[in-house]
Image: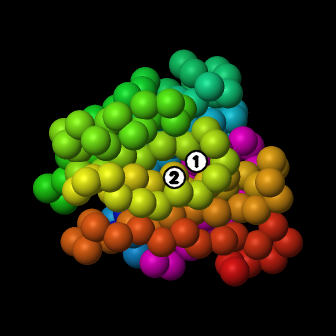
């Protein structure tokens, strides 16, 4: 199963649209958002995903009650732990305990955001994935990740800030 991962969208609606279009094109089965949606209106676009959805709140998410309602209960407090395709996944926003979570051996995959920097690596048998910033506001690069659960590999894909996919 392919899993789309995005984070730090920060209300950048054109980039969220590109991410949704890419995930739909790649036929991902599930999408994970690692926090910092921005406002609840981001779900005007995220509702077009042709996949299941799981998200967490980040440190810059406002109107959490409305975000929870519009997402139909699919945005959670962090850390959020769930299983997908037989893999145990923990999703957090901030990066401070990523290495400890991965080194614990309790999770197959640790997904995080906050740093706005892409990161794909292994710590022991645990895959660590940060898709970078989908919004592109901080570093001028818009990125997402696509995770292959069967291969336990993830790739970072750039989303052009001016046109389509890179």
Q: Residue at x 69, y 33 (%)?
A: 39
- Is residue 100 rendered to the left or right of residue 161? left
Give the magenta range.
Answer: 6-26
Q: Nearer the viewer, residue 131 or 122?
A: 122
Q: Position of residue 116 (x, y in %)?
A: 66, 48
Q: How is the image coloured?
A: rainbow
Q: Position of residue 66 (x, y in %)?
A: 58, 24
- Find residue 153 and report its image quarter: bottom left
Question: Please, what secondary structure does the residue beneath circle 2 have?
Answer: strand
Q: Is residue 66 magenta?
A: no
- Which residue is denoted by mark 2 in the rendering? 130
Q: Is residue 161 above or below residue 66?
A: below
Q: Residue at x 67, y 23 (%)?
A: 62
Determine which of the numbered discs, if any, sits on residue 7 in the image: 1
Q: Is residue 15 magenta?
A: yes
Residue 65 in view: yes
Q: Position of residue 63 (x, y in %)?
A: 64, 21
Label 1 with label 2: CB-CB less than 8 Å: yes
Q: Nearer the viewer, residue 82 or 90?
A: 90
Question: Please, what secondary structure does the residue beneath circle 1 have?
Answer: loop
In front of the other: label 1 or label 2?
A: 2
Q: Is residue 132 above or below residue 8?
A: below
Q: Residue at x 28, y 67 (%)?
A: 152
Give the quarter of the figure containing the N terminus: bottom left
Q: Residue at x 25, y 74 (%)?
A: 151
């Amino acid at each position: 199963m392919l899993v789309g991962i995005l984070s730090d969208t920060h209300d950048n609606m054109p980039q969220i649209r590109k991410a949704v279009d890419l995930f739909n094109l790649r036929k991902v089965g599930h999408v994970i958002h690692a926090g910092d949606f921005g406002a609840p209106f981001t779900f005007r676009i995220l509702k077009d995903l042709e996949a299941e959805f799981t998200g967490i709140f980040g440190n810059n998410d406002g109107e959490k009650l409305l975000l929870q309602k519009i997402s139909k209960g699919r945005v959670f407090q962090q850390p959020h732990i769930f299983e997908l395709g037989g893999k145990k996944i923990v999703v957090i926003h901030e990066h401070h305990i990523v290495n400890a979570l991965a080194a614990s051996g309790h999770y197959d995959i640790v997904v995080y955001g906050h740093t706005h920097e892409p990161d794909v690596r292994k710590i022991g048998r645990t895959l660590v994935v940060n898709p970078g910033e989908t919004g592109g506001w901080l570093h001028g690069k818009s990125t997402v990740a696509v995770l292959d659960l069967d291969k336990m590999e993830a790739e970072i894909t750039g989303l052009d800030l001016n046109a389509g996919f890179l």
